[in-house]
Image (cartoon, rainbow, N blue to C red):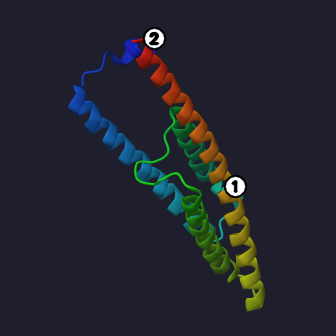
Amino acid sequence: MKLAQLFGKNQLDEMQERTMLTIESRGFWLVWSLLLVVLLVEGLLGFTMREMAGTWAVFMISCVYIVAACLRAGLWSRRIKNAAGTNVLFSLAGAAVIGVFTFVRMSAFDVPLAIHLACAAIAAGTTFVLALVVLQLCSAVYKKRHEQLENEFDKEEKDN
């Protein structure tokens, strides 16, 4: 038995289908945001990676899925322009969050302030570089895939 037969045919009209997609999208981003918050709070509370592994795995699988699906479809974002400057801005934002997180997390250890700052700076710098590299790679893949899909569409238009 096919999965489609098990659930039957789609009972929604176009308006309901669009509403359902909006609900599902908001639900995904709500769960994604909550997983991120849970990971940050657990990290600040001193949970070990072993204790956080399940949450981390679900979070990362959802991240990889959404990035891969968007790139495959040639989509970047509804509101954010694909540009190097934007990538730098988001990399800086991620670096700032990780820097502050590391600084706060380091406060659990009895070490001088200079070491707290050094650890936070190293974590922030590493995050900035890694995030920028990943965003730039995704940007290049997006541009290539978007152009490929546009060319396929143009070719189909000419044939018809």
Report x, y in % for residue 120: 70, 77
The amino acid on which the numbered mark 2 sits, given as a three-letter code, is Lys
Quarter of image, res 6: top left
Between 54 and 21, the residue placed more toward the observer is 21
Expressed as whole percent of the image width and height from the top left, the position of residue 93 reads: 56, 68
Residue 101 higher or lower than 84, as above or below:
below
Say which element carries label 1.
helix
Q: Residue furthest top?
A: 1
Q: Which residue is pictured at 60% across the width and 47% down the height?
A: 139
Disc number placed over residue 2 in the picture, else none:
2
**Label 1 packing within 10 angstroms: few (<14), some (14-19), many (20+):** some
Where residue 84 sits, quadrant-wise, is bottom right
**106 vs 135, nearest the viewer:** 135
Disc marking residue 97: none
Residue 100: percent from left, percent from top:
61, 77
| Horizontal side of residue 78 vs 19, given as left or right | right
The answer, for residue 148, to whether it is visible in the render is yes
Residue highlighted by disc 1? 133
